Image (tube, grey):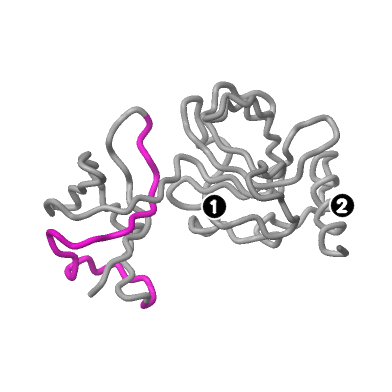
Amino acid sequence: MTENLDRRRLLTNAVVGSAALAGATALGSLAPEAAFAAPGEQAVEPGAPDPNFAEGRITGISAGMLFVTGSDLALWRIRITGGTSIWKLRPTTFDQVAVGDGLYARGLRLPDGTLAADSVWVNIVNVHAHIAAIGRNLLHLDHKGKRIVGHLVPGTSAARYNNTPAVSDMSMLRVGKHVQVIGAWVPDTNEVEIATVYAAA
C-alpha cells in the first residue's frame, strides 16, 4: 500500500512538473519482457481491463501527450513526463515516437482519465516462430504460416540460448528451430528489428 502511494505521489509530481523526479525505471523494469508481464501492483478482476495499462496505435502527438486508439477502439490520452521511460528497440527519447507507431504503456490512471506513463514500449512485438532461412543480418521467420523478416541490428540484437545471459553471437541459430523473438515492429510491414532472440542451443 505504501509503495502504491509513493508511486502515485511520484507520478503526480511528474505531471505537475517536479524538477526532482527520479527515472521511471525505479518504478519498474523497462526491459522489453516487462511489457508482457501480468499486472502486479493492483489486483484486477479476471477478464477486466487493467486501468493502468494501455495498448494501441498512436494517432496524434501534442505537448507531451500521446493520443492512442486501442485495438478495442478505446481512446487513450497518455501523458509522457520527465520520469517516463521509453523503449523503441532500445531505451530512447520522446522525440523518437511517431504517429502510426504501436505501443504498450504502464502507468497511473489520473482523475481526468489520462494515463501518466512510467514505461512505454513502442512497436514492441513478442513472436514465437520457426527460423525459415538465415541471411546476412536477417532471420526469415515462419509465424503461423506467415513470413516475418527479422533484422539483426549490430550492437543491439542479442541471443539467449537455454536461458543463458544474452550474447551477440547468433551462430547457434539454426534453420527449422523454434525461437521467441522480442523486437520492434516496423509499422505497416512484415518486418521486425530484433532486440532478443530466445533459442535452444
188 versus 159 height, above or below: above
* Amino acid at circle 1: Ala
Question: Tag 2: Cα neighbours inside 10 Å, few (<14), some, or many (≥20)?
Answer: few
Query: Tag 2, which secondary structure?
Result: helix
Q: Residue furthest front?
A: 46
Which residue is the site of mark 1?
35
Q: Looking at the picture, how far across and down is residue 15, in whole percent?
A: 80, 40
2 versus 134 height, above or below: below
Which residue is the site of mark 2?
9
Query: Tag 1, which secondary structure?
Result: helix
* Amino acid at circle 2: Arg
Q: Is residue 200 left or right of residue 74?
A: left
**How far, Cα to Cα, is label 1 from label 2?**
23 Å
Q: Quadrant of the N terminus?
A: bottom right
Question: Tag 1: Cα neighbours inside 10 Å, few (<14), some, or many (≥20)?
Answer: many
Q: Looking at the picture, how far across and down is residue 132, in whole percent?
A: 13, 51
Residue depicted at x 18% and y 70%: 172
